[in-house]
Amino acid sequence: MGTSTPIPTANTLTPEITEKAMTTNTATEQLTAAGRAIEHESFAVIDAEAGPHHYTAEQWPLVRRMIHANADFEFNGLTAFHPDAMRAGFQAVLKGNTPIVADVEMICVGLSKPRLAHFGLSTHHYISDADVIAQAKLENSTRAVQAMRKAHRLGKLDGAIVGIGNAPTALIELVRLIREEGVRPALVVAMPVGFVSAAESKDLMMTLNEVPWVAIKGRKGGSTLVVAAIHAMLSLAEAEQNKQAA
């Protein structure tokens, strides 16, 4: 019988990968050396395979993390940025106590609690609240619409990072609130997924100049991508924080 080739395991780290992990041990990284090594090797693979792109040095880490979240390289091109998006996101994170308002609970659950705590950020969602459900039934609208209206009534939207990954109607309502009622989030992460009004809602968001946004063009999107985008923003904000402290 011939000599069998050893099968690599999840705990097998090359010296090169280990070195990368050792140089990036920050509050917004994976909690273990093995986890950090795997994540950074994944980022290196994405950088190598993505090829040329038009994103800035600030924008690319966000796009790369979204590709990492679902192994879809089409986000290299589908992701669009308001010119002030990254600056606005950094400022919102670094000032602390910024609310993150989500259309669905999945986003709040997916965001890393230790990373949020590092910046003093809080998450909020209202789609399952009894009063939201009752009002949606009364007005024959969606829970997502009523949840955005409740967030506005509670004063949670102004200065917030708003993440929408599931409900196009939430994004359409948010655009209305911005245009008609003067709501001013710090940043909108506009990534609802679907076949009914998803692409159109993001097109609508991308017409706005008043509020910075990051959006995915077309039907693709999802809560996991909103989480990935916000995690990328936290990581970049911490890098800026460390640079200022140096």
Image (cartoon, grey):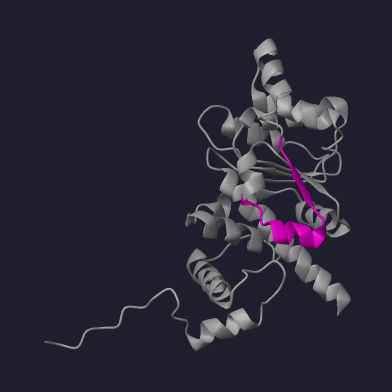
Q: Residue furthest front?
A: 130
* Residue 178 shows in the view: no
Residue sitting nearer the eye, 153 or 172:
153
User: Which residue is painted at 86% across and 56% down in the image?
Assistant: 96
Query: Where 232 sits versus 34, above or below?
Result: above
Question: Is the N terminus in the top left, top right, bottom left or bottom right quadrant?
Answer: bottom left
User: Which residue is painted at 51% across and 88% down in the image?
Assistant: 15
Q: Position of residue 122 (x, y in %)?
A: 78, 49
Residue sitting nearer the eye, 196 or 3:
3
On screen, residue 52 versus residue 11, left or right, reads right
On screen, residue 54 versus residue 178, left or right, reads left
Task: Count the labels in the image.
Answer: 0
Query: Where 37 sits versus 53, above or below?
Result: below
Res. 140 image quadrant: top right
On screen, residue 87 versus residue 135, left or right, reads right
Q: State the extent of the magenta-drawn residues as a range.
A: 110-125
Residue sitting nearer the eye, 173 or 107:
107
Q: Position of residue 5 (x, y in %)?
A: 26, 83
Res. 123 image quadrant: top right
* Residue 118 shows in the view: yes
Q: In the image, is residue 62 part of the stretch drawn in magenta?
A: no
Query: Where 27 sits versus 59, above or below?
Result: below
Res. 174 image quadrant: top right
Q: Position of residue 228 (x, y in %)?
A: 62, 55
Question: Is the C terminus in the top left, top right, bottom left or bottom right quadrant?
Answer: bottom right
Residue sitting nearer the eye, 196 or 80:
196
Q: In the image, is residue 118 part of the stretch drawn in magenta?
A: yes
Q: Position of residue 81 (x, y in %)?
A: 70, 50
